[in-house]
Image (spheres, coloured by chain):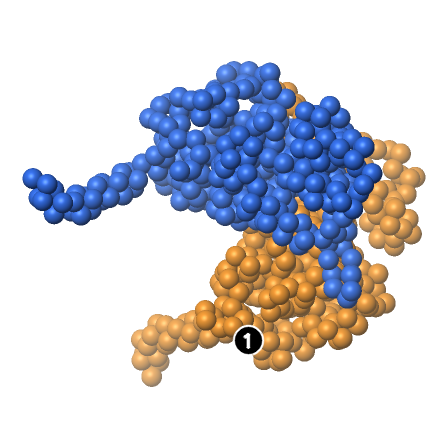
Chain colours: A orange, B blue
Amino acid sequence: MKRISSFFLPLVMLAFSHFSLANTALDPLPSWNNTDIKKQIVEYVSTVTQEGNEHFIPVSDRIATFDNDGTLWGEKPVYFQIYFAIDQIKAQAKNHPEWKTEEPFASAIKGDIEGISKSGMEGIAKLILTSHSGMTTQEFEATVKEWIKTARHPVTKRPFNKMIYQPMVELLSYLQDNNFKTYIVSAGGVEFMRAWAPEAYNIPKEQIFGSSLKTEYKIVDGKPVIMRLPEIGVNNDKAQKPSTIQTYIGKKPVIAGGNSDGDLEMLQWTKSSSHPTLAILVHHTDDKREWAYDKDSSVGHLEKAMILAEKDKWNVVDMKKDWNQIFPK
Amino acid sequence: MKRISSFFLPLVMLAFSHFSLANTALDPLPSWNNTDIKKQIVEYVSTVTQEGNEHFIPVSDRIATFDNDGTLWGEKPVYFQIYFAIDQIKAQAKNHPEWKTEEPFASAIKGDIEGISKSGMEGIAKLILTSHSGMTTQEFEATVKEWIKTARHPVTKRPFNKMIYQPMVELLSYLQDNNFKTYIVSAGGVEFMRAWAPEAYNIPKEQIFGSSLKTEYKIVDGKPVIMRLPEIGVNNDKAQKPSTIQTYIGKKPVIAGGNSDGDLEMLQWTKSSSHPTLAILVHHTDDKREWAYDKDSSVGHLEKAMILAEKDKWNVVDMKKDWNQIFPK
């Protein structure tokens, strides 16, 4: 018997791998349970991509925009970009002895998130501006690329780019396969995301938009560079998101995904399309596998958008119920 | 003899049309004469798209950015968008009796370009802001679409979208066929261009960037709209062009095309790529078929960029010598 099964093992494996392939081909969203939301998504995509269907959307109008923090990857206990800012401040601290007694730098050097929070939005902005400016765009990209390789999330101990949501990665891939142009429209820093997100989500840099600093083009040592200035250019949150979509893309999306009140206007704008739409709102309900939060959280605050979602029948994802996997294996 | 040639005429025509097709297949740039610049372009594209070649550029890095006014379409006697502004002012004049005695409106109503010029850049800005704001983005697009159908150029009497440069349309198409992503990065208004340029150049809205007004997202009669405000958001000229490319695309182009000092920084930035580059500078030298101008013209002023072009060996187009056709037939 043993000899026979050994003999047949490669064939059995082949059969299994075939089965698995066939299964994936049948189910483009394996990390989604067979609940309503998955049916809504699959039915939507099948309908609007079917030529001759009265709801058919031409390829040029298949624009899908997604928030990043809390929608495509985690955002707890605080936005991951803040950990990057803290690590940069720590690295620069030896050149800034005055930071030892100056907030929010003193707290940042100690890695004391609560201390940073006490300095409020102004303190956080100071931290971000200080750590994200004063270098060229090229130098900044190299710094983020290096950081994402080594930094670990304080709770899960995972690399931050392994805290992307597997079901959303599958959704992006499913949409891309159906000729949707997928974009990120985030309040996070555009250059921060472009350093790692293209690989994580299979979205090219030119389809990633976010908040930005003012920049200055100049010639340094005979070579042109773009310097990052310590001043906010665009704060890409709330009502700015539809304006950014209009300026950068010039088309109204037919699909949008978000998770907080910061995404309300983007989802509302998308719902006003003359085409059929999907307005996907990710609700963080899983305190075992991830975090559970909405209206009582300042990070990813979700209150008004949830009310509108119920009223206007958006497509709400209940992470605990609808996803059988959160992060990639 | 006569009977015989009549009999053979369809066959002769067929043979000719075949020849013509074959010729186009061999020559992607039929409106370009066989001068140096054409050879440079074809050699560049053949080299960088050849897998295994040491100068090969991966598809994801094949970014090509072009100015619009004076590079892809005409700009004389003044930028065409100014004719649009004048026509809008004329149409709105009956609701503004005060404009009859107020410059630059009084001149605009009379169609007096010289009168408008006397009010300087400030006057022109006033004209643009007044005629381009106070409506939704959707309404503005509809207005431009209507205008481009009926408006005619004062000298050539052509529709403005038939004053695009046929050789540049062929170049765009040639680059697109070779998997370059072609963008417009213009100082012209982004929403003005998006209303007609996608059809004229086969470039989708999301690859067209320009100057923009500030906008405001709001709900009017229960529906979300984006209002155009009478305030400049981005003035997309000179050193702003590389910054816009960085923010909107996030990649350094390998090909750029321009025609004036307003494009200097974009071409310089492109030349600094680690890949082989083409920096195409269109020089207006044909006062018979188009216009001849450079350093003495305020529209499309070309002086510093020409000096740099010679020094750094950019690819300069001499319209008179290098193009056998200017506008589409």
Q: Residue visible at 82% across and 68% down?
A: A303
Instruction: Tell me the SS state at disc 1.
Output: helix
Image: B298 above or below B51 = above
Return the x and y of residue A57 as percentages of the image width and height: 53, 65
Q: Quadrant of the C terminus of chain B?
A: top left
Please report, as a chain letter, where disc 1 is located.
A
| Mark 1 neighbour density, 10 Å: few (under 14) some (14–19) many (20 or more) | few
- Taking the image as drawn, is residue B241 in sight? no
Residue sticking out furthest to the bottom: A1
Return the x and y of residue A58 as percentages of the image width and height: 51, 62
A279 sits left or right of B179 in the view: right
Image: A14 above or below B157 = below
A179 sits left or right of A286 in the view: left
Q: Could you tell me the amino acid type at mark 1?
A: Glu
Q: Quadrant of the N terminus of chain B?
A: top left
Residue at the spot of label 1: A43
Displayed quadrant of residue B238:
top right
Q: Residue visible at 84% across and 33% down?
A: A96
Displayed quadrant of residue A103:
top right
Return the x and y of residue B277 as percentages of the image width and height: 48, 30
B228 and A90: which is toward the camera: B228
- Taking the image as drawn, is residue B9 in sight? yes
Q: How many marks?
A: 1
Return the x and y of residue B164 as percentages of the image width and height: 49, 36
A17 sits left or right of A255 in the view: left
A53 and B254: which is toward the camera: A53
